């Protein structure tokens, strides 16, 4: 499960794929965030005909076929094992994969992060919901998988991560047998170079986290 994460990275230290795709408005509005939860807007990277594109999306995917988004669930996680078959995620899995930058994610009072404190990519899917009045809402969900040795004592699920250098391949629209190439990315990632530390040392972060526990 991934229901809380942080993007506390300064603008100039964001991954180049994301930073180079941000226009002036995105750059001027960007601010590091110590806690991001479902239902809130988040920064993501997706691709269009011209290449990578930074975008703001609501966390909690609304399927494009849903007539009334207020009546259905907005899943903030999608199981990697079944994402190709679930009606809510099937089309996004094939054509609308995205990347969500993070500096850490939270489980049971701990923040899981890279030891070198560099940001990383959560694997996501996105969807555009179109209202009858012409309104548009972009939403997303985070893919999850079985945990590695680091996360297993804390939770039975963890987010799928996309390694640096595979960003554009992940975001490219593919179908059929080409999707098989992503299967090695959907399992538990190597925990070497990662840590799970108590967030109690950060009073403000601890307070925010406790309010949502």
Image (cartoon, rainbow, N blue to C red):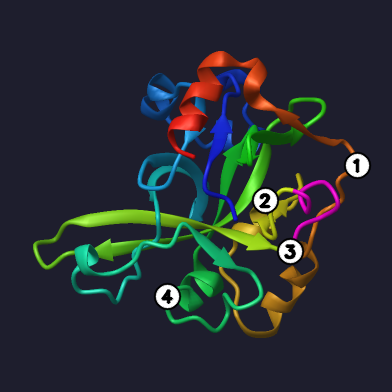
Q: Which of disc 1 and disc 2 is earlier in sequence?
A: 2
Task: Place residue 136 in its image quadrant.
Answer: bottom left
Q: Say above or below: 63 vs 134.
A: below
Local crowd size for mark 3, using a 10 Å CA cut-off: few (<14), some (14–19), many (≥20): many
Q: CA distance from mark 3 to mark 4?
A: 21 Å
Report the residue marked by disc 3.
146
Q: Nearer the viewer, mark 3 or mark 1?
A: 3
Can you give x and y, in whole percent of width and height, for residue 126 in the image?
45, 59
Q: Nearer the viewer, mark 2 or mark 1?
A: 1
Report the residue marked by disc 4.
88
Q: Nearer the viewer, mark 2 or mark 4?
A: 4
Q: Say above or below: 86 vs 14.
A: below
Q: Which of disc 4 and disc 2 is earlier in sequence?
A: 4
Q: CA distance from mark 3 to mark 1?
A: 17 Å
Task: Place residue 171 in its image quadrant.
Answer: bottom right
Is 182 magenta? The answer is no
């Amino acid at each position: 499960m991934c229901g809380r994460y942080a993007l506390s990275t300064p603008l100039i230290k964001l991954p180049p794929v994301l930073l180079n795709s941000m226009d002036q408005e995105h750059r001027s509005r960007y601010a590091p965030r110590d806690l991001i939860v479902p239902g809130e807007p988040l920064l993501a990277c997706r691709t269009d005909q011209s290449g990578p594109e930074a975008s703001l999306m609501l966390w909690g995917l609304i399927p494009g076929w849903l007539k009334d988004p207020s009546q259905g669930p907005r899943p903030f996680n999608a199981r990697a094992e079944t994402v190709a078959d679930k009606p809510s995620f099937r089309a996004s899995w094939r054509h609308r994969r995205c990347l969500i930058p993070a500096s850490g994610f939270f489980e049971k009072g701990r923040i899981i992060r890279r030891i070198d404190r560099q940001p990383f990519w959560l694997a996501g899917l996105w969807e555009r919901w179109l209202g009858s009045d012409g309104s548009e809402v972009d939403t997303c969900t985070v893919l999850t998988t079985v945990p590695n040795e680091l996360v297993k004592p804390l939770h039975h699920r963890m987010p799928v991560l996309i390694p640096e250098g595979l960003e554009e391949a992940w975001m490219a629209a593919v179908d059929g047998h080409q999707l098989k190439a992503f299967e090695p990315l959907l399992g538990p990632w190597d925990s070497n170079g990662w840590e799970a530390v108590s967030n109690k040392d950060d009073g403000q972060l601890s307070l925010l986290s406790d309010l949502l526990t």
